[in-house]
């Protein structure tokens, strides 16, 4: 178990490093990150000033090392004098960097003087709230529906739920959100269309965010349960005279749960991706909406910090899932 | 004499066994959902291709005096505008028809790019093994650490939106699932006797790959590609809806929904019809995909 744990941990660290590299590379795709920090058509001297200020004039590998580990030997409070292309000397203070390993993604460009990561973390609890609600909605209802279908295979309920599940997998979540707003906020006025604060605010965003997972999970609980119910050990359990309730609860459900754990881990990724869209629709003040706001206002340090943070959580969740999986099913541990 | 009878017998086999097309058609008819889906898709493609003939109005022509007309069956609706008009008086029906072009182009083009890239990288990975394999698979791991849409948003944020960029971004970020599937399939097929036989006969690598291996690993790729057309369409519409995708000047379902959201109270139809079109399209593709998966992999047939 320990070897398995260490191997997975090493893999995860490698992935996190790769994520950082990718986040760094994405910023280079523009050709000139300095130009992104300023409004378009800024004078060349301003761009040059920014470039020096953030160390963007240095070689890429130095920039990446600085991005990761910060200034070697303190840094900070230095100024550079350089001959500007506009004529005249430029005196530019260098922004100190502590590096990503110390949680420094630079300052937010929009919220002046605020570290980017702090801006992201401040918004995260609201996203977590929304995701937990959506997750519970998706997982609990999918278990109920999936079981109901499997135990009454071919019945009207089964057919109805299956049609709903196929529809649910096909409905784009942002449109579902718009429909819910239209029906329950605009037409009936039962639920608030925007914002957060009360439990009522949570209903529509959670349903919007969780429905795709709900539909997919329902189908998989159903087919998983049907597979398990056909196994020999279930037949044995029935043959020895256990009640159907016991057979399902003790023998079938447990074995259906194993593949579901992986699925739930993947759901976290789906929820994070969906949160970006759902939070924008419902003006929910979480990390997802922050990403979109920061993208449209070109606040790139915050985008970097948010993207990294979300990927980090996703990697951790998957690590956890693999560990739980290895614990539930010993065969996984031995596999290379 | 015996030989003649054997030949006669052998000749009868192919004529008796149903042809591939026949078999396909039969299976399609059994799965009613897939038939409906395929029919709807065909309709959509025809509408997209012949949009100038099908659409009653110019999709971008504003008619400010006709703004926010409801659909034909509602009060104040006119037969001029079947599904009503938007905030600038543009015909919703015509825009929905033209919008299908963007969705189809993005869905298909992005799948072609990501599929080709993924198959290529998967093949290399499985064949070369060693360091290159490890590198490619670690890149895949890193990409999987991001929710797909988040990665797309991050890249769009930097390189900018627009139709071509959206296609490229979705295409390039989407290769991972193909790469992984192809790699694992090739690894198992590579060891099969028929590949070994071909190798023993002196086939060169390209022949080995394209004649003997690739055709035998394409089944999951085709299924994956089908579903991905739908997910790329939704991704494009989501990006465009958020203002990060296709330019607002081009009629697309994403932009129509973004407009519709602003006019929810005054013109509910603006947010309904483009979304409905997108959902029906995705549903059709999913139905066809479900059927295709079962058709190509008989082991799955008992599940549904």
Image (cartoon, rainbow, N blue to C red):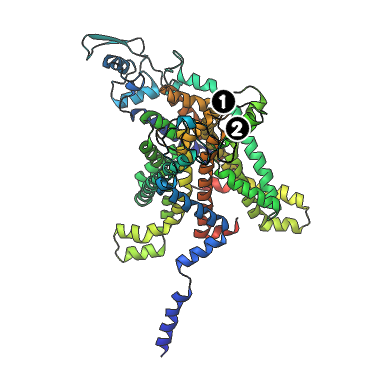
**How far across and how far down the image is residue B195, in percent?**
37, 62
**How far across and how far down the image is residue B209, in percent?**
34, 57
Cα separation, mark 1 vs mark 2, equals: 17 Å
Q: Residue A43's image quarter?
A: top left
Q: Is residue B146 visible?
A: no
What residue do we see at 35% from left, 26% from top? A64
User: Quick one: SS at disc 1?
Assistant: loop
Q: Chain for mark 1?
A: A
Disc 1 residue crowd, few under 14, some 14–19, many 20+, Cα 10 Å: many
**What residue would you read off at disc 1?**
A284
User: Quick one: SS at disc 2?
Assistant: helix
**What residue would you read off at disc 2?**
A182
What residue do we see at 50% from left, 63% from top? B25
Q: Is residue A319 above or below residue B292?
A: above
Q: Is residue A49 above or below residue B99?
A: above
What residue do we see at 38% from left, 20% from top? A70
- Whichever of callouts 1 and 2 sits on the residue coming sooner in the sequence is 2
Q: Are tags 1 and 2 found on a single chain?
A: yes
Q: Chain for mark 2?
A: A
């Amino acid at each position: 178990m320990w070897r398995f744990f260490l191997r997975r941990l090493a893999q995860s660290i490698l992935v996190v490093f790769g994520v950082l590299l990718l986040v760094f590379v994405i910023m280079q795709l523009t050709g000139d990150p300095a130009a992104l920090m300023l409004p378009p058509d800024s004078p060349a001297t301003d761009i040059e000033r920014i470039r020096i200020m953030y160390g963007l004039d240095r070689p890429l590998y130095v920039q990446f090392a600085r991005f990761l580990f910060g200034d070697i030997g303190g840094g900070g409070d230095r100024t550079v004098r350089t001959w500007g292309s506009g004529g005249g000397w430029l005196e530019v203070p260098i922004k100190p960097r502590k590096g990503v390993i110390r949680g420094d993604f630079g300052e937010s460009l929009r919220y002046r003087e605020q570290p980017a990561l702090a801006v992201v973390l401040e918004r995260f609890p609201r996203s977590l709230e929304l995701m937990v609600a959506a997750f519970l909605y998706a997982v609990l209802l999918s278990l109920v529906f999936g079981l109901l279908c499997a135990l009454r295979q071919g019945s009207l309920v089964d057919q109805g739920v299956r049609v709903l599940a196929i529809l649910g997998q096909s409905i784009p979540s942002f449109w579902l959100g718009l429909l819910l707003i239209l029906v329950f906020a605009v037409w009936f006025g039962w639920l608030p269309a925007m914002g957060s604060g009360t439990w009522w605010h949570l209903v529509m965003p959670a349903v919007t965010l969780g429905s795709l997972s709900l539909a997919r999970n329902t189908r998989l609980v159903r087919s998983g349960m049907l597979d398990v119910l056909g196994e020999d050990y279930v037949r044995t359990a029935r043959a020895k005279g256990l009640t159907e309730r016991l057979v399902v609860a003790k023998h079938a459900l447990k074995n259906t749960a194993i593949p579901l754990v992986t699925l739930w881990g993947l759901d976290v990724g789906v929820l994070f991706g969906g949160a970006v869209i759902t939070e924008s629709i419902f003006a929910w003040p979480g990390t997802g909406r922050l990403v979109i706001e920061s993208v449209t206002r070109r606040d790139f340090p915050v985008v970097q910090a948010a993207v990294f943070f979300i990927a980090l959580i996703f990697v951790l969740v998957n690590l956890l899932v693999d560990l739980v999986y290895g614990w539930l099913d010993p065969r996984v541990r031995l596999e290379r | 004499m015996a030989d003649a009878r054997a030949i006669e017998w052998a000749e009868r086999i192919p004529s008796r066994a149903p042809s591939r097309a026949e078999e396909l058609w039969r299976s399609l008819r059994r799965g009613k959902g897939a038939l409906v889906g395929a029919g709807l898709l065909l309709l959509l493609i025809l509408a997209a291709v012949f949009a100038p003939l099908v659409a009653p109005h110019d999709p971008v022509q504003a008619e400010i005096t006709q703004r926010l007309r409801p659909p034909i069956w509602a009060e104040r609706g006119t037969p001029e505008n079947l599904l009503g008009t938007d905030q600038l008086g543009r015909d919703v029906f015509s825009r929905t028809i033209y919008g299908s072009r963007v969705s189809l182009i993005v869905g298909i083009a992005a799948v072609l790019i990501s599929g080709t890239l993924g198959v290529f990288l998967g093949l290399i990975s499985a064949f070369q093994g060693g360091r290159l394999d490890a590198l490619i698979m670690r890149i895949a791991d890193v990409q999987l650490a991001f929710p797909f849409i988040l990665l797309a948003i991050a890249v769009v944020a930097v390189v900018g939106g627009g139709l071509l960029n959206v296609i490229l971004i979705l295409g390039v970020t989407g290769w991972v699932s193909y790469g992984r599937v192809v790699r694992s399939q090739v690894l198992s097929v590579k060891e099969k006797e028929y590949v070994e036989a071909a190798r023993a006969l002196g086939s060169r690598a390209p022949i080995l790959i394209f004649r003997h291996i690739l055709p035998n690993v394409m089944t999951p790729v085709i299924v994956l590609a089908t579903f991905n057309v739908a997910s790329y369409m939704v991704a494009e519409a989501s990006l465009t809806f958020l203002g990060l995708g296709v330019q607002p000047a081009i009629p697309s379902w994403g932009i129509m929904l973004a407009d519709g959201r602003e006019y929810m109270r005054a013109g509910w139809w603006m947010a309904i019809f483009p979304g409905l079109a997108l959902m029906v399209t995705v549903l059709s593709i999913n139905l066809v995909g479900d059927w295709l998966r079962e058709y190509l992999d008989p082991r799955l047939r008992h599940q549904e």
